[in-house]
Amino acid sequence: MSLMPHPVAGRFGDFGGRYVPESLIPACAAVADAFTEAWADKTFRDELDNLLAVYAGRPTPLTPALNLGAQLGIALWLKREDLAHTGSHKINNVLGQALLARRMGRTRLIAETGAGQHGVATATAAALLGLSATVYMGTRDIERQRLNVHRMEMLGATVVPVTSGSRTLKDATNEAMRAWVADTDRAHFLLGSVGGPHPYPWMVREFQRVIGAEARRQASFTPDVVVACVGGGSNAAGTFAGFVDTPARLVGVEAAGGAAMSSGAPGVVHGARSMVLQDAEGQVAEAESIAAGLDYPGIGPEHAHLGAIGRAEYRTATDDEVVAAVGRLARTEGIICAFESAHAVAWVLRAAGTPDLPTGSAVVLTLSGRGDKDMR
Amino acid sequence: MNLLPGVARGRKALVPYLTGGITADWTDYLHAFEAAGADAIEIGLPFSDPMLDGVTIQQASDHALARGATVASILADLAATRVGVPLVVMTYANLVVRAGPAAFCARLAEAGVSGLLVSDMPVDEVAEVEQAAADAGLALILLVAPVTTDERLAEIARRARGYLYAISVMGTTGERATLAGSAATLAARAKAVTDLPVLVGFGISGPAQAAEAGQVADGVVVGAALMRRILDGATPGELGVDLAAMRAALD
Ligand SMILES: Cc1ncc(COP(=O)(O)O)c(C=O)c1O
């Protein structure tokens, strides 16, 4: 049996579940039923696969990073989600959920966004499928990811500034869930990562599985290490799903200032039991990262489980390492990646040639997005 | 565990909500509420991420946390206060999970609390807390919503203790100009399947709405309307007057 199976009652070992107010239970159950049915329906799968191909530009390439690899003494391959339409892996999940929302008769998408990539993808799918989109975004993120705010508005979405708490992704997620409670008949909550109540962690992983499945097919070798950055963990979950049943080590890299796996404790936030950065009484801590998409105190429950059973390992990268990694990748390979994605690069730069990533290793690294949004 | 004995005698229950630690002298509000005719009082343990709360109770929670209120300080304040009506703690799952359900419930009981309501712990996830609450002698209050199916309503009514809390409207807590039509429908559905008192909450903002809800339900929970007044500086005496007006409307 796969280590990343269909979860029973939304549980991944001790983690997951559906910790939402009673008002949201029927809506979550409706999403779970609709997804279960759609995922088993060839027509739905074909429609999604077709959109991923003719609209989103899949499959994305697996690029050998020959220059950087040679410098580091490893074989390094980049799974190029930065080349997907809208500039990140977020489009994979968004197209899936937007098709599902339309199938469920919903007319409105509600989303949270940190870096704005998920918001842009949601605005894009809404435009394509004739749905309306409301995107909640912390004011701190609006300031630092302004390009993506302009893109969302150009695409016809409404961006709602969130001023509560740390004014980042955590607070935007609270606000999106509040908006959903008040409009469950018309709206689909289009969550952007593998957190949240069941079925989101499972559903979003399945929609992102295409990353790992393609990379596995494209790789002419068996990687020793598969690495991806982790905010909520969707690009990592999708990548890992393609390699979980191989001997490859799976490594997720969190922001040092948002390291739920290294510095958190079990808790419940945004609908799932998982690892959470928090104080001794359970007040959720405010994360702090240069990468708005990783500036989040939680992590998807399946990652908490994969970490607990030792199948995946979680590391961190600091803001300084990340900035250096963006520059190094740009100058050696001609690829400007997002701050989020650069966490995975930063770990490879630090670990290569050490026992953590020995010389000669074959590495598949998911480059989750492109860096235009971070140019200031 | 009968938290609201008056209901059996035909009295409509009035249950005000208060964010713990909202002011330095916050327990004075408890005395004012009791004097104004509260049958029980819900104490909110403030949480950093209150996703079921609208802007008023978010502000109240932030305010209390910014003042330095903690679970420990709020429970210590409660333990040092004599209140003649049952106290129910209302909070979010993470505070319970962090402490561990058994330890958390034991601490509430030690502080003199009689009931617990965890907003984001639906009946499907509540088993461990249900056991811990029972062991500590706390009534575990559960929520029902307008969208709750008949099957779930029956299950929730079977598992709830103390009273059944009917969320009047699909949305977050907060003041509303009128009582949603969904409130009466839900209260009637709930009354049909349980002998527990059924209270209507969310958006009860004044005497008229309290009276209207009291027509179908066994009582009301009033939260955001009171918290708005406290955030605007109202004293315990002034809130006592507000609450007494709701008491009169219910009677
Ligand atoms: C480019 C990019 N990578 C990664 C992430 C983090 O999300 P996840 O961990 O779900 O892949 C984001 C989120 O905004 C992003 O924009």
Image: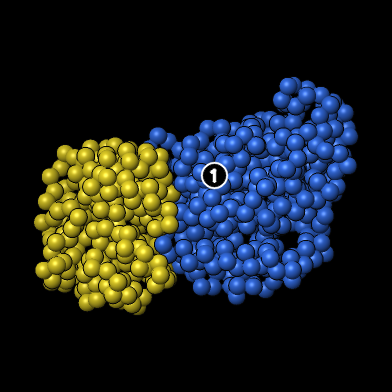
Chain colours: A blue, B yellow
Q: State whether residue B148 appears in this view.
A: yes
Mark 1 close to ligand 1, CB under 8 Å:
no
Q: Farthest residue toward the front? A: A1
Q: Is residue B51 above or below residue A339?
A: below
Q: For this view, does A57 lie left or right of residue B220?
A: right
Q: Nearer the viewer, residue A91 or A31?
A: A31
x and y, in percent, of residue B191 in the image: 27, 73
Q: For this view, does A83 lie left or right of residue B36?
A: right
Q: Secondary structure at mark 1?
A: loop
Q: Amino acid at mark 1?
A: Gly
The quadrant where residue A95 appears: bottom right
Q: State whether residue B187 appears in this view.
A: no
Which quarter of the figure is the C terminus of chain A placed in?
A: top right
The quadrant where residue A40 appears: bottom right
x and y, in percent, of residue B127 in the image: 38, 51
x and y, in percent, of residue B10 in the image: 13, 71
Q: Which residue is mark 1?
A: A13
- Residue for point 77% across, 50% down: A213
x and y, in percent, of residue B166 in the image: 32, 67
- Residue for point 33% across, 51% down: B130
- Residue for point 46% across, 54% down: A19
The answer for which chain carries disc 1 is A
